[in-house]
Structures are given as C-alpha cells and as structure tokens.
Amino acid sequence: MKKSILTLIMFFLFCFAYSQESKKDEQLSKGYIGLSLGVALPNGYLTSNGYDAGAGVNYGFINAGYRFSERFGATLNWGGTTHLTGALGGEIYALKYFAIGPMVSFSLKNKKIGFDLKPQFAFTTLSVDNDQYDGSDNLFHSSTLGVLFGGTVNFSLARHWCLPLNFDYLVTKFDEISSNGASGEYKVGSFNISTGLQYKF
C-alpha cells in the first residue's frame, strides 16, 4: 500500500510539472463533470468467510476532471457501491469513496473517442447495516485510505456532451467489530463497470 501511494505521488508531481511546461497545449485544456451508474463486483473478505456478498450497484454522484494540457490533468470522483450479504440475513453493506489523482488522456478517431487513465487516492468508508448484534446498526465500519485504479472510454455525442464507459477497481482495508469486541483489519475490493453522461467545458 505504501509503495502504491508513493508511486501515485511521484506520478502526480510529474504530470503537474510537465503540464506547466506545455504552454503550447493550453488552448486544448478542458474539463468535464458527470454522473454514472453501473454494476459493482466485490472481492476480498466480504465475498468469503461466510459473508457471500453478491454483485451490487455502483453509483457516481460526481465524476469530474480537468486537463492541464492535452495529455495530462487531474480527476475527482465521489461515489460508492452497495451489496446484499447472504450471511447477515440479506442485510446491505455500503462502500463509499472520495477519490482524487492524476489523469492521462489519449485521443482517437479525430478526438471523437478518447481514453482517460486515472490512478487515484481514495478516502473510503465501509459499513454493514445490521440490528442483530447488541442493537447496533453498524456491524462493520471503517474510514481509511485506499487506492482506486480507473479508466474511462469517452464517446463524444455533441460539443458539450459525452458518453463515458468506466472501468474502476477500488481496494481498501476496514476494521471488523464483532459482538464480543474483537477487531481486526481486512482487505476488501470492488471492480466496477458503469456508464452515464458527462458535460464537457
């Protein structure tokens, strides 16, 4: 995890420095903001050990990016996933994230189709609604730093509108708090595929 974070920091600094020197590309700088909805495929601790979390819903409340130059920029994403867990009587767990990081863009087909590569830091929270343990509604809870590896294929629809196809993998850790007070640290991840609508400016 520490190596991944250090790599992201170095990559972000490189992108920023490069963009400052690429004055000739400034007229091509642009940004976008959008929403997305799709499927989330969990993996890690909650798909084993009797929890059996299934495929769920991935939602993106804010998908935003800004390009410092034609190639390099930054991205910000706020969203989450929800899943049903078989082991807890069909209760729901929610994995939420706020992610930020660098963005590398590639254009195809006269800029009608593009691809954005987006490795990000992700501030995550995870909880499972459950009222079977000491009257608590929160059997699991975590607020920690994870990593979100993202990629988006963009299909231009009009001057200001774009159809994105997002592929993201989120990995983080959380603490398990059981009814007897025991706790531990466990990895959980989610592979997300989504689409939506972006406004380009």
Image (cartoon, grey):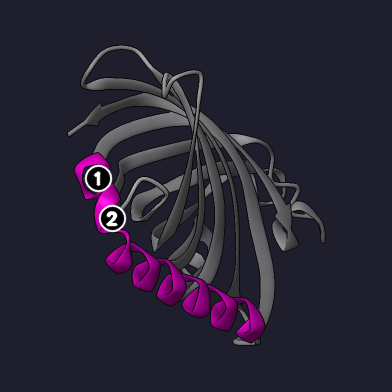
Could you tell me residue 157's position as x and y percent? 34, 12
Q: Residue furthest top?
A: 157
Circle 1 is placed at which residue position? 29
At 69% from the left and 39% from the top, the residue drawn is: 54
Residue 117 in view here: yes
Quarter of the picture holding the C terminus: top left
Could you tell me residue 117's position as x and y percent? 53, 48
User: Any mark on residue 68, and which?
Assistant: 2
Region rendered in magenta: 1-30
4, 49: nearer the viewer:
4
112, 75: nearer the viewer:
112
At 31% from the left and 33% from the top, the residue drawn is: 35
Residue 75 on the magenta span: no
Residue 28 on the magenta span: yes
Callout 1: 10 Å neighbours few (<14), some, many (20+)?
Answer: some
Q: Is residue 137 above or below residue 79?
A: below
Callout 1 touching callout 2 (CB < 8 Å): yes
83, 22: nearer the viewer:
22
